[in-house]
């Protein structure tokens, strides 16, 4: 049997409309998983992702959901369960940035980032975990960031939210381990997405100096690691943070 | 001594099974405290029992206060299962 097969599994990818989330949704489908993706605002982009998933002849569900809103998360996971079945794999990918120097950082902006990036992962995990625990099989993969450990100027809220995900990852790995539910994090570095498009050419050159491979990564580089962690090949890995950053240290 | 078809007996079997305990179900008295002194279970065992109760008896414990009240002894678990089944009609 293929060690990376996900045939028959149901995966949920939050924030699956574009960038890393889209690449993850498509990569999971490529390995045979049915995929539910949710988006907050970009319906057209999410439908495009759904089309790419459907091309692999797997089940697909695309729905609007604000992961920071408990009721919205509840409705989304209820639909996943009815239309695809209980989730086997959860990828907490939905994230936002509201960068700015700390001295100018407004409470509302801080709260917004923490609510989506960290509380969103909490709410989605709570909505999905019990089914996984009852069936003694599950994979939870949190998409963190290189800035969680290193910090990044202007990213206090983002870095803090992503570092929070690492604590969540390690704690849940301990709480769920004996039930066969594995919890890991992937920490992308500089990946070619809209989040990175905001950098000027100079800033880009500057940040790339720190990357051993001297180039930015692709969303697919992250997706491959998520597939691996979701697959039977990663059966003895939990509580880990896998950096996908081209050597950013 | 319980009949082997009683609910209390089934609960004891479920506890021993899910915690892989080196004791026999009949060694657990109905009113033996499960946590602390008594059977000596700890906090990670709570999750095991909560899940096993749902798998085996279809009863869901989602609240910490309810959990504390229910997971005291085999007796309290049996009462909770009875209650839940009556409520479900």
Image: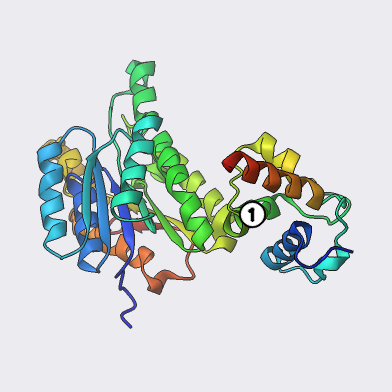
Q: Which residue is at the front of the view, A155 or A249?
A: A155
Q: How many numbered discs, if any?
A: 1
Secondary structure under the numbered disc 1 in the rendered image = helix
Residue A140 location (% of width, % of height): 42, 54
At x 32%, y 59%, the residue is: A10
Judge left or right: residue A140 versus residue A83: right
At x 18%, y 47%, the residue is: A19
Judge left or right: residue B35 versus residue A109: right
At x 85%, y 67%, the residue is: B26
Judge left or right: residue A110 versus residue A65: right
In this picture the colour scheme is rainbow
- Quadrant assignment, res A14: top left
At x 32%, y 40%, the residue is: A76
Q: Can you identify the residue that label 1 sits on?
A: B53
- The image quadrant where one finds the N terminus of chain B is bottom right
Can residue B73 be seen from the camera position used here?
no
| Chain on which label 1 sits | B
């Amino acid at each position: 049997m293929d060690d990376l097969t996900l045939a028959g599994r149901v995966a949920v990818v939050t924030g699956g409309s574009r960038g890393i989330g889209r690449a993850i949704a498509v990569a999971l489908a490529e390995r045979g998983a049915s995929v539910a993706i949710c988006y907050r605002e970009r319906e057209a982009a999410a439908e495009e992702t759904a089309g790419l998933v459907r091309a692999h002849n797997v089940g697909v569900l695309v729905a609007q959901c604000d992961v920071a809103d408990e009721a919205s998360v509840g409705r989304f996971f209820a639909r996943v369960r009815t239309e695809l079945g209980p989730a086997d794999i959860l990828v907490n990918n939905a994230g936002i940035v509201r960068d700015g120097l700390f001295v100018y950082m407004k409470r509302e902006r801080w709260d917004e980032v923490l609510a989506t990036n960290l509380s969103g992962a909490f709410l989605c995990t709570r909505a999905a975990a019990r089914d996984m625990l009852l069936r003694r099989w599950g994979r939870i993969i949190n998409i963190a960031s290189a800035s969680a450990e290193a910090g990044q100027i202007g990213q206090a809220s983002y870095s803090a939210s992503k570092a929070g995900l690492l604590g969540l990852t390690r704690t849940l790995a301990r709480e769920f381990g004996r039930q066969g539910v594995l919890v890991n994090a992937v920490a992308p570095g500089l990946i070619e997405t809209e989040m990175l498009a905001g950098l000027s050419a100079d800033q880009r050159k500057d940040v790339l100096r720190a990357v051993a491979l001297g180039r930015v990564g692709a969303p697919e580089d992250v997706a491959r690691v998520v597939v691996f962690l979701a697959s039977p090949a990663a059966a003895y890995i939990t509580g880990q943070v896998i950096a996908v950053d081209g050597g950013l240290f | 001594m319980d009949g082997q078809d009683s609910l209390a007996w089934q609960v004891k079997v479920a506890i021993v099974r899910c915690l892989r305990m080196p004791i026999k179900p009949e060694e657990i008295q109905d009113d033996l405290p499960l946590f602390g002194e008594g059977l000596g279970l700890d906090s990670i065992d709570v999750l095991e029992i909560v899940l096993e109760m749902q798998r085996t008896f279809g009863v869901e414990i989602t609240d910490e206060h309810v959990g504390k009240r229910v997971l005291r002894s085999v007796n309290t678990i049996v009462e909770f299962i009875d209650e839940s089944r009556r409520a479900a009609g």
